[in-house]
Amino acid sequence: MLKQGILFGVGVGPGDPELMTLKAVRTIKEADVIALPKTDEQYITALEIIKAVVDISQKEIIEIYLPMTRDEDTLRSSHQKAGLQLAELLDQGKNIAFLTLGDPSIYSTYIYIHNWLLQEGFHVQLIAGVPSFCAVAAKLNMSLCKGAEPLHIIPASYHHNDDYLDWDGTKILMKSGKSLKKIIDTLQTKGLIENSSMVERCGMDGEKVYKNLSDVNPGSSYFSTIVVKDKEKKQ
């Protein structure tokens, strides 16, 4: 009987190929199949990151369509379809490296497929990657937290109120998307605009660093991360 393959959810970091881990590089090199999330810009970004480090010209490459929607039925259906597509390859004994930006355990669409296959009895593993907010902090040359300071990771576009901005500690606002203008207006209202910084497309082509959010274009890229420090603690 053919030995079942393993699915690896590989975090390839936020965009800079030099931030890929040695383990991620090795896993991709050893994999039989490279799975790419087909979500327009994310698909292109993940592919460009690994091509700068690993020769994948001889690899079998498949696209996994993951729609950009919040409709639960559509998402559930697409995740199951993706799981079945990967399961067929795993049953052939092939090891698969499924690429995901940043770290697969942080707001990654991949994790739904991972969990579905895990429940179906397949062998799946996560390969940690550098999270985007850590790369952003390095680019801003600042500490995110120290001592007893808390750190909050907020999917900003999902929140319908702004209470999180009143929490003690550093706030990381991810997935701001179309909510960016509203977020900036709220930061201004709460007197936090001077304590906020942002990096757009960190480590990618077109990277922009904003120490002053008044200069930010509301139409900035989906790949934008805002760091909000406590008023008395901005660096």
Image (cartoon, grey):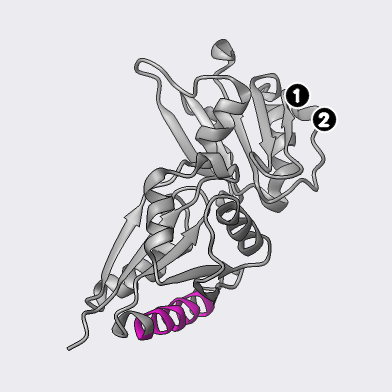
| Residue placed under numbered mark 1 in the picture | 212
Q: Which mark is residue 15?
A: none
Q: Looking at the picture, how far across and down is residue 225, in whole percent?
A: 62, 39
Q: Which mark is residue 215?
A: 2
Q: How crowded is mark 1: few (under 14 residues within 10 Å), some or many (20 or more)?
A: few
Q: The residue tagged with tag 1: helix, strand or loop?
A: loop
Instruction: Point out the residue furthest to the bottom here.
Output: 1
Q: Quadrant of residue 224?
A: top right
Q: Residues within 10 Å of mark 2 (few under 14, many from 20)?
A: few
Residue 105 in view: no
For the record, the magenta segment spans 74-88
Specify whether 167 is left or right of 42. Answer: left
Residue 96's place in the image compared with 169, above or below, is: below
Q: Quadrant of residue 33?
A: bottom left
Residue 96's place in the image compared with 221, above or below, is: below
Q: Residue at x 49, y 58 (%)?
A: 100
Residue 199 in view: yes
Type of the residue with mark 1: Asn
Specify whether 114 is left or right of 140. Answer: left
Type of the residue with mark 2: Asp
Residue 185 magenta-drawn?
Answer: no
